[in-house]
Image (cartoon, rainbow, N blue to C red):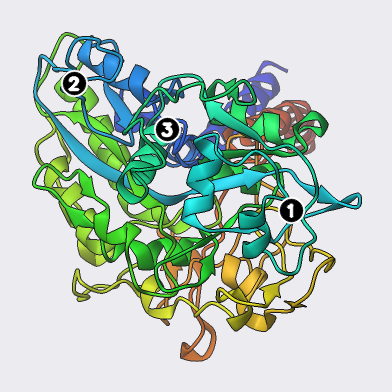
Amino acid sequence: MNLRRRLGRTAAILAVVTLVALVPVPAQADGYVPISGSGSTWSQNALDQWRKNVANNYGMTVNYSGTGSSAGRNDFINQTVDFAVSEIPFQSQPEDNSPPENPTSGYAYMPIVAGGTSLMYNLKIGGKRVTNLRLSGEVITKIFAGQIAKWNDPAIQADNPALAMPDVSITPVYRSDGSGTSAQFTLWMSKQFASIWTYGMRSQFPQVTDAFKGQNGSLGVAGYVSQNYGEGAITYVEYSYAMKSGFPVVKMLNNAGYYVEPTYQSVAVALMSAQINNDLTQNLDGVYNSNDPRAYPMSSYSYMIVPTETNKVFTPEKGRTLSRFATYMLCEGQQQASALGYSPLPMNLVQAGSDVLKRIPGTEGGVDFNNCNNPTFKPGDSPENNQLALTAPAPPECDRKGATQCVEGTGGAQEETPTTGTGGVSGGANSADAAAGTAGTTGGGTDAGAAGTAPGTTGGTAADPVYDANGNLVSAAAGGTSAAVSAPFSLAENGWGTPQIIMLAAGLLVVAAILIPPVVGRRSRGGKRPL
């Protein structure tokens, strides 16, 4: 009897050891320590998705608080975070007369994601939602300077021949907190229409008239516009938030005379005209005035502010985590940018970011450009090229300034708008889904931390397969001609992961503990010989 029990226990223990060995060891074994940051809400949808991805791939904990760019820069100065994210650099002369923003330890600006600052709106004509609104830059500026207060203003009507614009008051919605988005938007207005917008570049947007409504954060302004009480409202917000909210965005008139939506392709084209300063901050004058008919004028990119020396909270161990996270963002993470409502960084900005990585204490090193998997370039490409810009479609003729207007929807509202004026026509294949970069999407949403949009194409002409950070095939181009399609591996809240595997293993252990001893016992009894 004792022998049978010992044999049973031994078999059960062996089963346990075998099953435990099969359970994947979480990636925390790589030794990454938690890091934290704060700042921009403009780029937060991308950051939140990337944080989930590195948690899954590397067991990495990256905490981030979207408190606004101004707050993020102050947190970095006060050394309460390991990194900050902002759309504008530290301000030597803040517009609110607060002290100059002077960090007390070394830092560098590193580009992390590009995108278009969009004009998201809520407007109906005869009870039907408008999804194809077009506005010139001058009209946009007059709206946010309080000089145009009705949707049926003749200047708005001139931009929209296919719509009988309603006699509805305009409610401009602005960021009430210190915001890089406000700074970007007001910088554009002050550069392009200084005689209309007389407030200059401002992180703190002014209360221009009583009709203006202030809301905190990108979610706040997008949330106000998307509610029923937001009918008649318009706000400036990163394109990703309009996609997530399911609302349309304004097609903006560019220098070439076309009304263009801030898709990942139109942003990629526009940023070909950006000038990069020595500190990697951006000069967008060329973007604002690009003569390419495909360019979206309010395109820009966001910076991560990273330490280049240790301080009271930042250590070399944290530097190792930060450098690995940043490498992921510059390469594999950019595959998801278009589906999240952003535009992938081009090669020249990735090169600049790689140089910054090398300066972080404890860094794992710069980018391996032969294994980067960024959709804007391939190994051997020149930094002057951008695969997305090379393949960006021309805008349809009905989006040229004139007597016609495309009826297809924009942003997160792709349905057509009924023609209530004259000249409403279809833009065909170059409009709606094709122009917005959603052709070939599979439908369905991502988790709450992402932009909530379906996976879409990332563009490019590369026939090479695309791999994720673990070397798994993400997509392959068929026949050597199709563009590679990157399906974001969004981490569903109820997905299959390490906890589920551990539960399965535990269940198998219980079954093994129940079944193996009797089987061993029977065999032991069957093996006895009579004396």
Cα distance in 3D space between marks 3 and 2: 16 Å
Q: Which residue is mark 2?
A: 93
Image quadrant for the N terminus? top right
Asked if disc 1 and disc 2 are in contact, CB closer than 8 Å, the reply is no
- Mark 1, residues whose alpha carbon is within 10 Å: few (<14), some, or many (≥20)? few
Q: Which residue is mark 1?
A: 444
Asked if disc 3 and disc 2 are in contact, CB closer than 8 Å, the reply is no
Identify residue type, mark 3. Ser
- What x and y, as percent, mark residue 404? 68, 77
Q: Which residue is mark 3?
A: 182
For residue 470, say whether it is visible: no
First in residue order: circle 1 vs circle 3: 3
Identify residue type, mark 1. Gly
Q: Is residue 182 above or below residue 268?
A: above
Say which residue appears at 40% left-offset and 54% top-offset.
Answer: 334
- Mark 2, residues whose alpha carbon is within 10 Å: few (<14), some, or many (≥20)? few
Cα distance in 3D space between marks 1 and 2: 46 Å
Q: Specify the label residue 50 is tagged with.
A: none
